Image (cartoon, grey):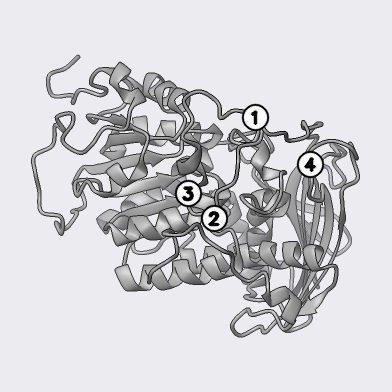
């Protein structure tokens, strides 16, 4: 290996344990914590969460033009952090240390930025604690587990002034940017409606049952800010998404964030003033999935605009000709846009333009990744360095799109529709407001 290339992983077998700062030589020259990152400075980044999504960052981390070092690979499951260490060994620069406890990363003043790809209940707390430690954060969707966490993220960002990019990567897609700009310029007239949709063929999941904690898993740290409970089999890896509201945000929080964000972007709307939902569990009635798997949500906005969410987790029929996307209706025409590009139609339905995008961003595949994620990560890096002035998805925008998912989930959970204050986004229903926040594990409460 070239002597100028930093050693990547120093004794990977040691990565199974949480390594205290200084336990392994860092390889970095000590610098002031408050150093100003210049346009060409190397960024020291850490990976927080090594599950399915982490692979989506590999391309950007390996691209030498991004000028980054991987300083830490952190996950509470031993086999996951070791796998990522092996995946990246010799392919990225940086003297990466494998750790179990994210506090080790936050305590290292040489770390500039963190990629937060943890389970939903960790997204917001992990991000605000990183900000308190002086780190910039690329936070995966959903950016929050509940509405109040979205408010807190915006407040923490304003207090600490850190760069916080939400991972709704279609905001960085050139085709999407092009057609949204055209829509804003009047290409389909006055826009009045968008239908956002997602169809997947998820299968049956086991009924959760009490069992021993899997070998190598730090169950208490996995739970982190959520009130701690006994371990149930098959929870930690992915099915926490469907095993209740303790950790997850259902399919709407998991995937609707992307398409609802595009819809809101196209219609140039903020908070809705009313939400109405029909949702239920329609498939594998006796399996371990405890939330809805099918939902239609209607959001009404000021100015007589509407967004519809059509989400089908376990029905692979492509109702709209694609597994996911957004259809925007205007007085003069219609646009279909997804991760593969867009198609523009006139009012009669005649096709006027097809972008025929060469994008390779994944659709419904677990983990995803592709050129949109790469561009989104580069935008994050460039704003940190001051090479670009604007994030494509700053947290104050991402939090509003995420709020739509929370409204839909809350409406389902309380079994009724409700009105919303379109100025501040608060729910005008006492039952709905009971779900505005959550209880935290003692000692993990947010401190702004």
Residue 31 in percent (x, y) is at: 10, 48
Q: Which disc is residue 211 wearing?
A: 1
- Which of pointers 2 and 3 lies earlier in the amino acid sequence? 2
Residue 349 in percent (x, y) is at: 87, 57
Label 2, on which residue? 171
> Residue at image x 55%, y 59%?
144
Q: Nearer the viewer, residue 293 or 393?
A: 293
The Cα atoms of the two marked residues, 3 and 4, are separated by: 23 Å
Packing grade of label 3 (10 A; few <14, some 14-19, many >=20) is some
Label 3, on which residue? 224
- Which of pointers 1 and 3 lies earlier in the amino acid sequence? 1
- Which of pointers 4 and 1 lies earlier in the amino acid sequence? 1
- Of all residues, the one furthest to the top in this rendering is 1
Label 4, on which residue? 289
Tell us which disc is closer to us: 2 or 3.
3
The Cα atoms of the two marked residues, 4 and 1, are separated by: 18 Å
Q: Secondary structure at mark 1?
A: loop
- Which of pointers 3 and 4 lies earlier in the amino acid sequence? 3
Q: Nearer the viewer, residue 406 or 387?
A: 406
Residue 234 sits in quarter: top right
Tell us which disc is closer to us: 4 or 2.
4
| Quadrant in which the N terminus is drawn | top left
Determine contact: label 1, label 2, CB under 8 Å: no
Determine contact: label 2, label 3, CB under 8 Å: no
- Which of pointers 1 and 2 lies earlier in the amino acid sequence? 2
Tell us which disc is closer to us: 1 or 2.
1
Packing grade of label 1 (10 A; few <14, some 14-19, many >=20) is few
Q: Secondary structure at mark 3?
A: loop
């Amino acid at each position: 290996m070239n002597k100028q290339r930093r050693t990547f992983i120093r004794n990977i077998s040691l990565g199974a344990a949480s390594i205290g700062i200084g336990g392994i030589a860092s390889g970095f020259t000590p610098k002031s914590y408050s150093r100003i990152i210049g346009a060409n400075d190397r960024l020291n980044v850490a990976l927080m969460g090594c599950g399915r999504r982490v692979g989506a960052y590999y391309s950007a981390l390996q691209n030498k033009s991004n000028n980054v070092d991987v300083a830490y690979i952190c996950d509470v499951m031993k086999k996951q952090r070791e796998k990522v260490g092996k995946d990246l060994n010799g392919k990225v620069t940086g003297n990466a240390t494998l750790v179990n406890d994210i506090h080790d990363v936050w305590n290292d003043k040489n770390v500039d930025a963190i990629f937060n790809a943890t389970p939903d209940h960790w997204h917001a707390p992990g991000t605000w604690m990183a900000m308190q430690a002086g780190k910039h954060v690329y936070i995966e969707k959903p950016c929050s587990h509940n509405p109040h966490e979205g408010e807190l993220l915006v407040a923490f960002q304003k207090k600490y002034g850190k760069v916080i990019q939400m991972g709704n990567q279609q905001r960085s897609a050139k085709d999407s940017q092009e057609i949204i700009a055209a829509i804003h310029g009047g290409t389909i007239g006055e826009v009045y409606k968008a239908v956002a949709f997602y169809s997947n063929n998820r299968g049956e999941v086991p009924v959760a049952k009490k069992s021993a904690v899997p070998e190598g898993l730090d169950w208490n740290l996995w739970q982190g800010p959520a009130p701690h409970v006994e371990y149930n089999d098959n929870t930690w890896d992915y099915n926490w998404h469907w095993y209740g509201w303790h950790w997850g945000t259902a399919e709407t929080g998991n995937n609707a964030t992307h398409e609802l964000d595009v819809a809101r972007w196209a219609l140039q709307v903020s908070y809705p003033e009313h939400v109405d939902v029909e949702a239920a569990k329609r498939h594998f009635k006796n399996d371990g999935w405890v939330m809805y798997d099918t939902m239609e949500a209607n959001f009404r906005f000021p100015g007589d605009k509407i967004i519809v969410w059509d989400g089908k987790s376990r029905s692979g029929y492509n109702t709209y000709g694609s597994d996911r996307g957004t259809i925007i209706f205007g007085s003069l025409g219609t646009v279909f846009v997804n991760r593969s590009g867009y198609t523009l139609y006139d009012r009669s339905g005649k096709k006027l333009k097809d972008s025929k995008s060469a994008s390779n961003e994944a659709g419904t595949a677990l983990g995803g990744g592709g050129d949109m994620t790469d561009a989104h990560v580069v935008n994050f890096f460039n704003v940190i360095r001051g090479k670009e002035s604007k994030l494509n998805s700053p947290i104050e925008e991402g939090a509003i799109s995420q709020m739509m998912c929370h409204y839909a989930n809350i409406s389902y959970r309380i079994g009724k529709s409700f009105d919303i204050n379109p100025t501040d986004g608060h729910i005008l229903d006492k039952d709905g407001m009971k779900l505005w926040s959550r209880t935290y594990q003692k000692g993990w409460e947010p401190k702004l």
